[in-house]
Amino acid sequence: MLKKLGLKKLGQKKLGVLATVATVLWATGGAFAFPDKPVNYIIPFNAGGESDISARLQQPYFKKITGDDLIIQYQAGAGGAQAWSVLNDQPGDGYTIMGTNLPHIILQPLLQKPGYETADLTNIYMFHFTPDALLVRADSKFETIQQVIDAAKETPGALTVGGTATNTANHIANQRFSTLTGAEMTYIPYTGTGATIPALLGGEVELLWGYTTVAAGQGDKVRMLAVAQDKRHPLFPDVPTFKELGIDMVGGAYRGIAVPKSTPEEVRQQLSDIIGQINADPEFIKEMEQAGFAMLDVPYDGMEAFMGERQKIYEDVARQLGSLK
Amino acid sequence: MNAGRDIAGIVGSVFFFLVGAAVFAMSFEMTPLAAMFPRTVGAALALLAAFYVFAAMRGYRGEAVENGSTVGDQAEGLGRRIVLLATMIGWALLFPVIGMFVTSLAACAILMFTGLFERLSPGRLAIQLGAVLALVICFYLLMNSVLNIPMPRGILF
Amino acid sequence: MAFDLGSVLVQAFSPFNLLLALLGVVLGTIIGALPGLSATMAIAVLVPFTFAMDPASGLIMLGAIYTGAIYGGAYAAILVNTPGTPSAIATTFDGFPMAKRGDGDLAMTLATLASVVGGVIGAIALMTLSPLLANIALAFQSSEYFWLAILGLTLIASLSTGNVIKGLIGGAFGLILSMIGVAVVGGDVRFTFGSSALLGGIDIVSALIGLYCIPVLIDLVARPDRHLEPAPLGRGFRFFEALGLCAKNTVNLVRSSAIGTLIGILPGAGGSIASLVSYSEARRSSRHPERFGKGEPGGLLATESANNATVGGGFIPTLVLGIPGTPPDAVILGALLVQGIRTGPELFTQQSGIVYIFMFGLLIATLMMLPVGLLIGRYAYRFIVNTPKSLLVPLIAFMTVVGSFAIHSNPHDVVVMVLMGVLGWLLSLGGFGPSPIVLGLVLGQIAEQGFIRAYMIGGARDNFGGQLLFDRPISWAIVALIVITLGLPLLRLLRARSGNGKEAQP
């Protein structure tokens, strides 16, 4: 009882404090703590993608903190919609959690009928994001964003830029970039991040809307022109942010964790705290950043404000994309 | 079976003609890029099907496009076929509601009798039922516990 | 290259790694044999265990599972006419007729031998030519994928000799099925009729299971006779007979393995196209094309060697470029990343020890497939032949339901599987076989996206024709193959008609 009260209060505080205090609490009250059996973690995408990799990185820390396993399951389909549309049918005991992705869970209900509404998903933590990045081949003539903008303005639509599918984070990034700078490029959709890389390296497209993870994986074969982060990514200290260049773009694909609606309030908070603890582990941060991810800490009590803000941004872009059709 | 017109082929082709025409018509509600393939393929399907109906009416009949499973005399064992299909459909629709284990056990038992052609002594019947039970349990455990596939539990199990 | 061959060999052949390779091959074969359970799934389940091992051992195990699972796909294809994975589609064409007439033991042995040959050739290509071949992954662009898909579709024409129109109708229907769901280009929601369950489209594997397996089940319960003709007792593996057939098909095996390796390198093509194209090539260059589809060993050898060669081929872009060649490669790549191993050119220079241990491990695992496969294959065959129908029917039916559910843990896939099965059965009554539909379904997305992307890029560069064909030598080559594949039978037919008409089919 004491533990529950303590955690509830702690949830309001800053995360760094929480992490240390919570560790002590877990160490002392571990025997009675949630969870006391393995937790199923459903990834709504195929194994091997960014959602899977970040979950795999979380796995050992979850075990370290709680003493219980985090079992990763896959339920891919319809860009994640298939799993999200059945999340609330799962038992709400905290032992079933599901990865969620932005902008997917906002854009899908806006543009299609995916079988769920954004409000149906109870997000308890947003733990990282892969910032949008504009990439070129290492031997490309483009060295800076300005050169791209100039070339695109000279012959609108002649430059091709690849990205993943339509109405996705990449597509939105392209639309926002175009709105903010007036640079018009032809957006070429591919089936997944994996398919975009050979397209860029093989010269089918001149530029690529990708993520920092792509640049981290491809090393010196690609050049990142700018990243859509507030601050420069620790792995790429030389790559400017769009903000530095006067283009107000911060965003990418955000990843978090949601629980079924029936999950009690205190379990939501406890899960949020566990994920927060994992996110505060310096080793975990190092591994995530090495892979190109950018850390993000939106705990359960900050979720409403965060989702509200993203919802507004994506609605604007969706309107622009809709008017394009 | 070899005499007369290819009635079944004509019926099938009419179905395909309707599908092709519908796809062609629906493509006009799509954005230009997404409409390109449905329009082409829909038109092609409708034309091919219409051509086949025309040819078959005039007495053309080719061989069946078939490999592997042979479609023999369809009247034979019609009752069993219908039981099998009904079981499969019921199984597919009910297992998320009632639960994988119970529906599978029931369906497998029904199918066991569907596939049974000779009379069995009660002892052998019990062995076979036991084998079906073991089969369902083994697969269920393999999926649920080894491969981490969340099996729907539904109302019962 | 800074690595010591001796120490690599010692590590690759360490008892622990050998044991892992053996375990991996056995597990992979069993999982691959069950329709719906894929190599991707098996690998994903085992990835956490490999974190406890050292990276090379973990990799060997994952590679062994992968190659075993691709091989295992042949079992269900031969014994119950159900391709458990898209890469085994063409295996059913000749494998099941062979089993049906009582040559199931020979078919299993042939599939094993072909898989080993294909796997070894793929692995050797991986070991020796990786950096060179990786460039192929980059040279193939949207237009080439489009033409490759069309080349695969030409197989419809040869599969449906006797009634090409029905074959083409089936193919077009399959193409339409492939369009269901959210369009990658344009983002339109197509042909879902408001159902959110169809947004993700029709899953290929569940459609495969339904179209091929439900008619088999229906046949099984309709008649009291046996599912497969049993082999006479004491005939053994028919190993030397199979070896003799392989020797006769040496060119076929090498060509199919080469096709498998090359197509395996292409991210987004994979085992299905590789085995279809090599089947089509084997049929085209055979002296008896009319025997294909009726239990011709050459067809079985072609598909099984090609799909196992994609394993080695698929690792080439995965290890050299960090671009997964196939979905299982993506999982392995993710596992490497989590272990802190960077793929790419550095992998070959800085961590070459691990890479070469892994490659040797893959080779060993492939070779182990021979004894393991012969043994498991023999028992699987006997099991299917000797199990009474009353148990075989629930067993196969349960596999179809559980297998199609397992693909995405999605109940809708099971409904799709059953509906496709009923549809496939009804259509087969009208003489429309399942294979053209399946080819359309499997190749539709690749063809459509390839064409539309080439169209968009061509539009942006004001050079559509060049982008699609004229400026692209690889496309020329594929188009030439398409013309030959379609033209040769026509030419033969014309010659037969103008001659004494001996070869002309009635």
Image (spheres, coloured by chain):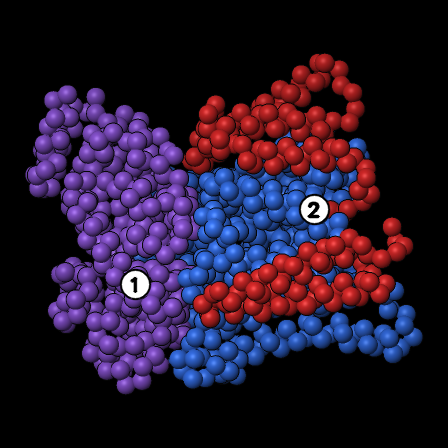
- The tag on residue A88 is none
Where residue A165 sits in the image (x, y, percent)? Answer: 39, 62
- How many neighbours does mark 1 have within 10 angstroms: few (below 14), some (14-19), or many (20 or more)? few
- How many neighbours does mark 2 have within 10 angstroms: few (below 14), some (14-19), or many (20 or more)? many
Is B132 left, or right, of A22 in this rendering?
A: right
Secondary structure, mark 1, is helix
Where residue C288 sits in the image (x, y, percent)? Answer: 78, 64
Label 2 marks a residue whose chain is C
- Which residue corresponds to mark 2? C425
Name the one closer to the observer, A279 or C435: C435
- The tag on residue A319 is 1
**Which residue appears farthest toward the right when viewing the image?**
C500
Secondary structure, mark 2, is helix
Is C249 left, or right, of A315 in this rendering?
A: right
Where residue C253 sits in the image (x, y, percent)? Answer: 65, 61
Answer with the quarter of the image where residue B138 lies.
Answer: top right
The chain letter corresponding to red is B
Residue located at (48% from left, 23% from top): B156
**Chain A visual colour:** purple
Q: Quadrant of the N terminus of chain C?
A: bottom left
